[in-house]
Amino acid sequence: MSQTISPGAEKPYGVQRVCAVWEQARSSFYHALRRVPQAVPNRRGPRPGINDKDLLALIRHDLATSPFTGEGHRKVWARLRFRDGHRISRKQVLRLMRENHLLSPHRGRPKVAKARDGKIITLAPNRMWGTDGTRVFTLDEGWVWIFTAVEHWNAECVGWHVCKTGDRYAALQPLSMALSRLYGSVEKGVARGLSLRMDHGTQYLSDHFQNQIKFWGITPSFAFIAEPQTNGVAERFNRTLKEQAIYGRIFRNVDDVRQAVKAFVGLYNSEWRIEKNAFTSPDEIRHIWMENRQAA
């Protein structure tokens, strides 16, 4: 009505005049105007190679067949893009997963960076490993310990150990496993040049633990107190291990936990795609590095 042309003045009536005649506030008019749905603009840029319906079907199939749970859109996009060869946009995958409630619920709020925040990722293997221990409850034997050793370069789990008593001897087992597998022995000075990031747990502060890693040539590197992010590589792996293989399951004894950890570590190293590895698995990035080294 406000845009109707007056026959006498040959001008629009206007919002002010129409609202005065109808005894309505202009704010109510503008409020109702804002609630009118606006036309959705057409998508800018080139048309995607696959439509939303087909891509959504691929996303659902990938989530259903993935051996892992609680994954976000980056993991799904990486598998579809780099493993299956579909030329799709990450933002397109994010939009479809958000619209269809397929995003992972395991996401925390971003935290404010601290002055000590920094990079602990190395540019080559066997420069720094991280180690940490965590506990799992069993029905028959109570709490049992899981100790892991993780490579900072490609986030590979290089060693692990499951036991009932989480003492200084048990904490050394994943390191012994890793040295035997990657260095070929546990002799004196075999890992010279390697640093070990760990927290201030009693196992790691003991004289036996410190003397043993120094015997192997490993330099101790302690995380800051009350800042687990400074041992973030090992902490993140243990969190992934619990989310994928521990939570939601009931274990009766140490052997049950040991079998679950063994199965997950093999699957993780071969299949878990990591963004900092250009969405390749730890085994794949190590294989590529060895091929490039041999070629050089």
Image (cartoon, helix red, strand yellow):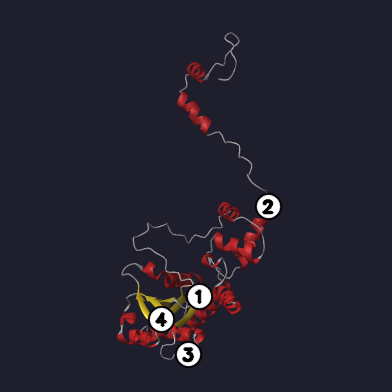
Mark 3 vs mark 4, CA separation in Å: 28 Å
Mark 1 vs mark 2, CA separation in Å: 36 Å
Labels 1, 2: front one: 1
Labels 1, 4: front one: 1
x then y, percent, for residue 162:
44, 83
Callout 3 amino acid: Ser
Circle 3/circle 4 CB separation < 8 Å: no
On screen, residue 190 above or below 54: below
Residue at image x 42%, y 66%?
Answer: 119
Q: Nearer the viewer, residue 33 or 11?
A: 11
Q: Which mark is residue 156?
A: 1
Mark 3 vs mark 2, CA separation in Å: 54 Å
x then y, percent, for residue 150:
46, 76
On screen, residue 268 above or below 38: below
Of the image marks 1 and 4, the number of the one nearer the N terminus? 4
For label 3, the residue is 185
Secondary structure under the numbered disc 1 in the rendered image: loop
Of the image marks 2 and 4, the number of the one nearer the N terminus? 2
Callout 2 amino acid: Asn
For label 2, the residue is 51
Of the image marks 1 and 3, the number of the one nearer the N terminus? 1
Callout 1 amino acid: Glu
Secondary structure under the numbered disc 3 in the rendered image: loop
Mark 1 vs mark 3, CA separation in Å: 19 Å
The residue positioned farthest toward the front in the image shown: 296
